[in-house]
Amino acid sequence: MDIKLSGKKILVTGGAGFIGSNLCEVLLEKKNTVVCLDNFSTGKRENIEPLKENPNFTLINGDIRCLEDCMLAASGVDYILHQAALGSVPRSIKDPITTNDVNVTGFLNMLVAARDNNVKRFVFAASSSTYGDSESLPKVEDVIGKPLSPYAVTKYVNELYADVFGKTYGLETIGLRYFNVFGRKQDANGAYAAVIPKFVNQFMNLESPIVNGDGTFSRDFTYIDNVIQANLLSLVADKEAANEIYNVAFGDRNTLIDLCDSLKGFLSNYNPKIKDVEVVFGPNRIGDIPHSHADISKAKKLLNYNPKFSLKEGLKESIDWYWENLNK
């Protein structure tokens, strides 16, 4: 990834999580100093274990709901990549209060910490869930509907707060609306596991994955390296690109049936029996958006974003990791 970014001090919140730990790794490879803030509620210590030996890596075991932790972590940093959040639409429906505490109060704490520590730019993980009940395709940044879950509400509130901090305090922010990110270091276990590692795990165990609905719902699946590229570009982009929201995706869509067929094809190279595993169809899930397909022209124009990995290319890259790590 040929993006010139070195010699900076960068805070990654949620740095032990799936996306955060991948960002920490790449930033260190590029000779930056990295501070990781995580409370390990969803992040995993093994994700950052190899990084601890690097003298340019600092771990702060703290919570974004605590302003003191945020202020400590943001002290002296040039940039913040804010990845910390409580993800999952179903979890937010089950427990909206905790989701709001982490995603709204925690986000506001980080904005205040960024402002008070004179951070140059605050880049944050927004979400495609913000498009809500809007049926227009592809999804364009300034056309959204009403949120369909408490999680979606919190991620939209993040965008509103970032906009206000830009206008009121002059803080440079960039929001990246992620679309169904997948790849190495992604957790396949737990009630709220993302669909790709969850299905991979089930196929490997010769279990039938349960697809919500009839399988025709579609998603713009986005490989982790595309997301890393967007984050790094957001840090080095011109001032004109700041205080904006961008879609981060590949710019294509695949149905859940397409996804299952691709997974079976790749995984059957390891175990031919996987080809015969049937997919089970269940009821639609509350809060789910039927179709997700991003228009990425704004990110291409203002950030020079150029995603390299389609769903199949991303699966090709990550299936070895899934097989080795989910088989333990």
Image (cartoon, grey):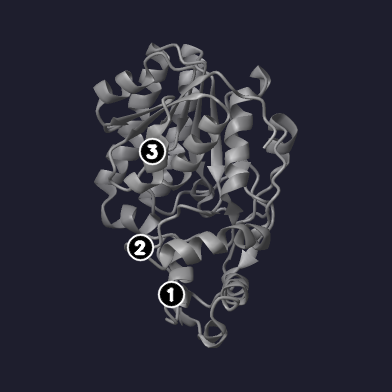
**In the shown orientation, is residue 254 left or right of residue 276?**
right
**Residue 202 image label:** 1
Density class for disc 3 (Cα within 10 Å; few <14, some 14-19, many ≥20) is many
Residue at image coords 59%, 25%:
235
Q: Amino acid at mark 3?
A: Gly
**In the shown orientation, is residue 241 left or right of residue 90?**
right
Q: Amino acid at mark 1?
A: Gln
Q: Quadrant of the C terminus?
A: bottom left
Q: Secondary structure at mark 3?
A: loop
- Quarter occupied by residue 117: top left
Q: Pick the residue in front: 128 or 234.
A: 234
Q: Secondary structure at mark 2?
A: loop
**Residue 189 image label:** 2
Label 1 – label 2 distance at C-alpha:
10 Å
Residue 69, above or below 316: above
**Residue 14 image label:** 3
Residue at image coords 37%, 25%:
110
Q: In this view of the protein, can residue 143 be seen by the observer?
A: no
Where residue 324 appears, as percent x and y from the top left, is: 47, 64
Density class for disc 1 (Cα within 10 Å; few <14, some 14-19, many ≥20) is some
Q: Amino acid at mark 2?
A: Asn
Where residue 7 appears, as percent x and y from the top left, is: 55, 18
**In the shown orientation, is residue 265 left or right of residue 212?**
right
Q: Quadrant of the N terminus?
A: top right
Residue at image coords 49%, 50%:
129
Label 1 – label 3 distance at C-alpha:
27 Å
